[in-house]
Image (cartoon, grey):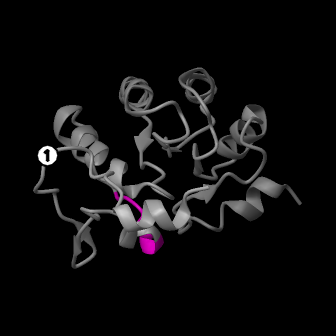
Amino acid sequence: MDVSLKLKKYTDIHWVEEPTQSDDILAHAKLEQIGIPIAVGEAIPNRVIFKNYMQQKAITFCQVDPTRTGGVSEAIVVALMAKILNVNVVPHAGDMGQISQHLCLFYHIGLGLPYLFLEHIPYLSQHFVYPAQLKNGFYLPPEVPGSSTEIKQNAIEKFKV
């Protein structure tokens, strides 16, 4: 039986996240071709690899992570490419949702990208002076200037090497 016929039954799958090695663009493209929405990006280190994913139509959801792509500037460049190439942007917030909350606002308001969602993994929030705040499952816009990444002094002392 044709594998693609089996997979098309699963139309309620929102995405499959990095189903193979993150640098295997052609494998992700093949999965996209048979109708599987692919989310990839948390392990992609730069805009060039994102560009290659987008040009090969190997990505449905771009999970650019500013802490793994060289910072905010690189993440914004990736989001701009995604906008031009009609790729959804749902940042990977893993370890630093603090930064991604700001970028989500910019992507939506500044770039006009659709508002989708941002994961929330709260295990580090206790260590930030201004942790990300959520209400009814939504991030609240930060009320203080900056990137929300100031770490509490006691956490610095506790974890320094």
Is the residue 48 above or below the residue 139 in the image?
A: above
Magenta stretch holds residue 122: yes
Left or right? Give the position of 45 relative to 31: left
Q: How crowded is mark 1: few (under 14 residues within 10 Å), some or many (20 or more)?
A: few
Residue 141, given in percent of the width and then of the height, sits at 16, 57
Left or right? Give the position of 73 relative to 16: left
Regarding residue 114, the answer to whether it shows in the image is no
Magenta span = 117-123
Is the residue 100 above or below the residue 131 in the image?
A: above
Q: Name the residue at 36% across, 61% down.
A: 153
Spot the residue most to the bottom. Answer: 136
Magenta stretch prevailing secondary structure:
loop
Front position in the image: 7 or 126: 126
Spot the residue most to the right. Answer: 1
Magenta stretch holds residue 154: no
Q: Name the residue at 65% across, 67% down.
A: 9
Is the residue 105 above or below the residue 152 in the image?
A: above
Front position in the image: 22 or 27: 22
Q: Quarter-wise, where is residue 75 in the image?
A: top left
**Amino acid of disc 1:** Pro
Total labels: the figure holds 1
Q: Quarter-wise, where is residue 161 in the image?
A: bottom right
Q: Name the residue at 39% across, 68% down.
A: 154
User: Which residue is labeled 1 in the image?
Assistant: 145
Residue 107, given in percent of the width and then of the height, sits at 27, 39
Regarding residue 144, the answer to whether it shows in the image is yes
Residue 30, given in percent of the width and then of the height, sits at 74, 39
Residue 144, given in percent of the width and then of the height, sits at 12, 53
Left or right? Give the position of 5 relative to 51: right
Is the residue 29 above or below the residue 141 in the image?
A: above
Q: In which quarter of the image is the N terminus?
A: bottom right
Is disc 1 placed on a helix, strand or loop? loop
